[in-house]
Image (cartoon, coloured by chain):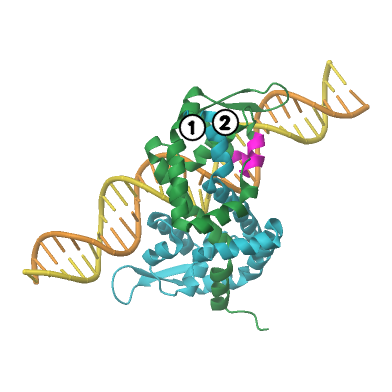
Chain colours: A cyan, B green, C orange, D yellow
Amino acid sequence: MKHAGWRQVGRRIASECLAIRVRRLGRVITRIYDTALTPYGISIAQVNLLAAIAVARGVRPTDLTQVLDVEKSTLSRDLKRMEDLGWVRSGRTARGRGRSLTLTPAGERLLVQVGPAWEQAQQMASAELGKQPFEQLRKLLSPFAPL
Amino acid sequence: MKHAGWRQVGRRIASECLAIRVRRLGRVITRIYDTALTPYGISIAQVNLLAAIAVARGVRPTDLTQVLDVEKSTLSRDLKRMEDLGWVRSGRTARGRGRSLTLTPAGERLLVQVGPAWEQAQQMASAELGKQPFEQLRKLLSPFAPL
DNA sequence: GGGCGTAAGTTGTATATACAACCCAATCCC
DNA sequence: GGGATTGGGTTGTATATACAACTTACGCCC
């Protein structure tokens, strides 16, 4: 066939690209959670880290990059901010290389406090997407849960 | 029941949060497409804009914020970059407020050129997620296609 | 036990993203 | 027509994200 013109290419990409859909979904969902979390001065990205560290106490940053699929430089700065905020602390690992991360008491308290807002955001997302799609999506994306 | 401790809250969030899954998926998918597009010096986010403008010639930025669920300030700067790169041009709207966006010839050419790399990325994403999940996901997210 | 290789982390730079505050010009309304 | 309203856009500031380059310190191996 003749090589496609820009109009065709544009239509095809706009109508079929997975990345574009996923990224838009991300913006919409992120907004919902961040808005719900505003009163606590924390973002869903930060709640993510807080929860991950809570679950796997003593993890090293490098382990988190695997579990979360985040670039190490990104994580480095995100953790820096959260240490500065006093939510996370890092010490030496028992054995081997790298630092070991734990929540501070303030971090633990904060995690408990944001629980209800997170639940509410989860509800709002469900309402936004529709109950069925929400659950289908959650199911489909279970390989991406950090647990 | 007693109020949950931080361990419980952490586990619950880590294991059930939709936002966390969606955001991680976004990172993984974005990386796949951006890597495939590297040779062309363009990101999937920019391809998104290019395609959207190609499809809806003469759109105003404000219209795109609706279609793409992007904040207007974000879009403002993204478009600025693309205008500076010579891919997009903006003129006055026929009637009413706002600017009207079109691709430059270079932008049109680029869109055609990246077509195959995009197809390849779409394939890679399918391989990464599995054929079935890929299609289920695409289907489920069709409300988020900008078309 | 000293040198080397490599894993872990940080730093430089750039984009994508958002919110808040602001600016400007088109429209509306009397 | 002219002042008020408001829609559309930009700018200030901050976070999240990535890649590349660099640093450092652990651990291995002979």
- Residue A2's x, y, as percent? 47, 28
Q: Quick check: can you spot residue A86? A: no
The reply to whether the magenta stretch includes residue B69 is: yes
Q: How many numbered callouts?
A: 2
Looking at the image, which is closer to me, A129 or B83? Answer: A129
Task: Tell me the number on the disc at residue A115.
Answer: none
What's the CA distance linking mark 1 and mark 2?
A: 9 Å
Q: Mark 1 packing: few (<14 Cα in 10 Å), some, or many (20+)? A: many
Type of amino acid at the residue the image marks with label 2 = Ala
| Residue B54, numbered circle | 2
Determine the image quadrant of residue A110.
bottom right
* Left or right, residue A87 beside residue B99: left
The numbered disc on residue B111 is 1
Q: Position of residue B18 (x, y in %)?
A: 59, 62
Q: How packed is label 2: few (under 14 Cα within 10 Å), some, or many (20 or more)?
A: many
* Residue A30 to residue A3: above or below: below
Q: Amino acid at mark 1?
A: Leu
Rendered location of residue D20, percent (x, y): 31, 45
Q: Secondary structure at mark 1?
A: helix
Same chain? Circles 1 and 2: yes
Residue closer to the observer: A87 or A72: A72
Direction from residue A83 to residue D21 in the image, left or right? left
| Residues in magenta, as a range | B62-73
Q: Chain of mark 2?
A: B
N-terminal label among 1 and 2: 2
Residue contact between numbered discs 1 and 2, judged by CB atoms under 8 Å: yes
